[in-house]
Image (tube, grey):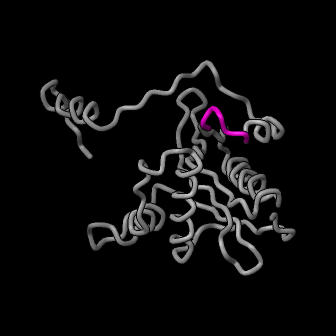
Amino acid sequence: MTSSVIPTIRPARPEDVPAVVAMVHELAEYERAPEQCHLTTDQLTSALFGLGAASDEPSAPALFGHVAVDERDEPVGFALWFLNFSTWAGVHGIYLEDLYVRPSARGTGAGRMLLATLADICIRRGYRRLEWWMIDWNPAAGFYASIGAEQMSEWVPYRLSGDALRQLAGHANTVGTRTGD
């Protein structure tokens, strides 16, 4: 059943992390890949807030998050994002890693408001793009088209992970490269 209360959007707080992690796992289940989702509360806390990392020193977060909350200030949706950079435009943009709204809050405008919040950040900061990937069978394609999002069919995603990533990394020192993290 869809709630009639319009959610509020705000930046994620440390106390929201368990709910966001639970929703990330719900999203993985929805996308038919629950066995691939290993996110923990500690990992997300560290990524968002630089807290609980391996060292005692807080680090600068590289991941940002917003939540849609109900009238009890309980998260019912989230957007996790980070900055990317366009060498052609010469400015940053936002890459939306995940957007999810719990079924009970769908139809309330939570997804649109989360995206509008990120679009507002882009405009205020002078960023030129808000980008994301979507699994090809997701029915949200119609919603994205309705807000003016363009499908970028000419770009093909690539990914290195697992053994292939380790194998390529093994060549870093043998080809004269230095990885000055």
Q: Position of residue 181 (x, y in %)?
A: 27, 46
In the image, residue 110 sits, relative to residue 132, either above or below, namely: below
The boundaries of the magenta stretch are: 134-139
Which quadrant of the structure image shows residue 172?
top left
Would you say 59 lies left or right of 136 here?
left
Would you say 49 lies left or right of 123 here?
left
Would you say 150 lies left or right of 62 here?
right
Q: At x 42% / y 50%, what residue is drawn?
A: 35
- Quadrant location of the N terminus? bottom right
Q: Position of residue 144 (x, y in %)?
A: 76, 39
Q: Position of residue 84 (x, y in %)?
A: 53, 41
Can you name the residue that lies furthest to the top here? 154
Q: At x 67% / y 39%, what residue is drawn?
A: 138
Which quadrant of the structure image shows residue 88?
top right
Q: At x 57% / y 61%, what residue is drawn?
A: 23
In the image, residue 5 sits, relative to residue 38, either above or below, namely: below
Q: Main secondary structure of the magenta part?
A: loop
Q: At x 39% / y 68%, what residue is drawn?
A: 42
Which quadrant of the structure image shows residue 141?
top right
Q: Position of residue 65 (x, y in %)?
A: 58, 60
Is 133 covered by the magenta stretch?
no
Q: Considering depth in this image, is 101 or 57 the residue closer to the camera?
A: 101
Q: Considering depth in this image, is 19 or 88 the residue closer to the camera?
A: 19
